[in-house]
Image: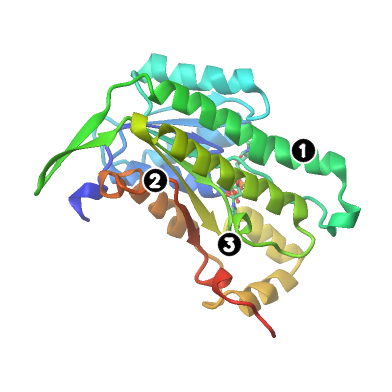
Amino acid sequence: MITGSKLDGIALIVGSGSGIGREVSFSLAEAGTKVIVFADRNEDTAKATSEESKKYASNKDYQTAVFKMDVQDAQSVQDMVDFVVKQYGRLDYAINAAGVDNGKNAPIAETDIDNFDRIMNINTRGNLVCVRAQIAAMRKQEPKTWTSRNGTRDIGRGVIINLASANSFVGLPGKGSYTISKHGFMGITKMAALDHAAEGIRVNAVCPTWVRTPLLDIELQKNPEVQGMISAIVPIKRAAECEEVSDTIAFLCSPAASYINGASLLIDAAVTTTVRLF
Ligand SMILES: NC(=O)c1ccc[n+]([C@@H]2O[C@H](COP(=O)([O-])OP(=O)(O)OC[C@H]3O[C@@H](n4cnc5c(N)ncnc54)[C@H](O)[C@@H]3O)[C@@H](O)[C@H]2O)c1
């Protein structure tokens, strides 16, 4: 492991109870994070994940806490960030992994506006509310430094990583509402990075295609055609493993990534590099 990829700070993972957020907690714990606050609207899964993460922790002082919240409720988001700062003194790494899929797929002309509002409220507005509260806390804390073989440098006040999507760049037929919401989330990432870089806050997004979460496994059981789609579209013919996303997130939080800001990093095995004709 390169020494610059080690972590030692206080983390908050929103959407930590399942899928990618769950696996992020394992990657952050392995990398040395001292505290992880597990936020989710599902308290039971967040609690279970928080317990499971202890198996992977490399920091001897590793601690966890669970916070029930909903990204659609701005007060619960503010309470969550206040809890982290009051309890642990600062917020070093905030991961925004709460999100929902498209619901019933439909072409734009048949968009169900109630469904569109629901998706935008969680994936875009809800995540903006999270990023806003996290930055407001980070900008008040002291910056950190990192000492490497080449001396000491400022690595800033805090890092935010957003779970956007390959759909932040391209569309999939029928997935209009999700695609629009994820384009918005990439916009939030760019603007937050730009507006707060001078304050030492880095904001990046990771943008995966299909990831092997339990939800994808259920989808594959219900609809085996999805496997055919993955084989046809993904050049390496498989979905990403969760840790192929979560380990990247741990790296982006680390001092090794201290010059990466405003990036939307595709994790897509080159899916979006070409037009597929057959
Ligand atoms: N799984 C994939 O293939 C894939 C691909 C690209 C992007 N993503 C994105 O990654 C993120 C995580 O996806 P996942 O597959 O791990 O999903 P998931 O459903 O397994 O996990 C999402 C977590 O977020 C929580 N959550 C949902 N709505 C919430 C809300 N309103 N408030 C608080 N918590 C809430 C859920 O309880 C759950 O624990 C999403 O934003 C998704 O769009 C996933």
Q: Earlier in the sequence, mark 1 or mark 3?
A: 1
Q: Quadrant of the N terminus?
A: bottom left
Q: Note whether 233 is above or below 167 in the view shown.
A: below
Q: Which mark is on residue 118?
A: 1
Q: Note whether 50 is above or below 102 in the view shown.
A: above
Q: Earlier in the sequence, mark 2 or mark 1?
A: 1
- Residue 272 pos. (x, y %): 57, 69
Mark 3 element type = loop
Badge 1: how crowded within 10 Å, few (<14), some, or many (20+)?
some
Residue underneath mark 2: 261
Residue underneath mark 3: 209
Q: Is residue 18 among the parts visible in the rendering?
A: no
Circles 2, 1 touching at the beta carbon (< 8 Å): no
In terms of image quadrants, where is residue 106?
bottom right
Q: Which residue, as the protein is rendered here, is positioned at the far top? A: 86
Badge 3: how crowded within 10 Å, few (<14), some, or many (20+)?
many
**Label 1 lies in ligand 1 vicinity (Cβ under 8 Å):** no
Frontmost of labels 2 and 3 is 2
In terms of image quadrants, where is residue 140?
top left
Q: Note whether 195 is above or below 77 in the view shown.
A: below
Q: Note whether 94 is above or below 219 in the view shown.
A: above
**Label 3 lies in ligand 1 vicinity (Cβ under 8 Å):** yes
Circles 2, 3 touching at the beta carbon (< 8 Å): no
Distance from Cα at disc 2 to Cα at disc 3: 21 Å
Badge 2: how crowded within 10 Å, few (<14), some, or many (20+)?
many
Q: Residue at x 26, y 49 (%)?
A: 256
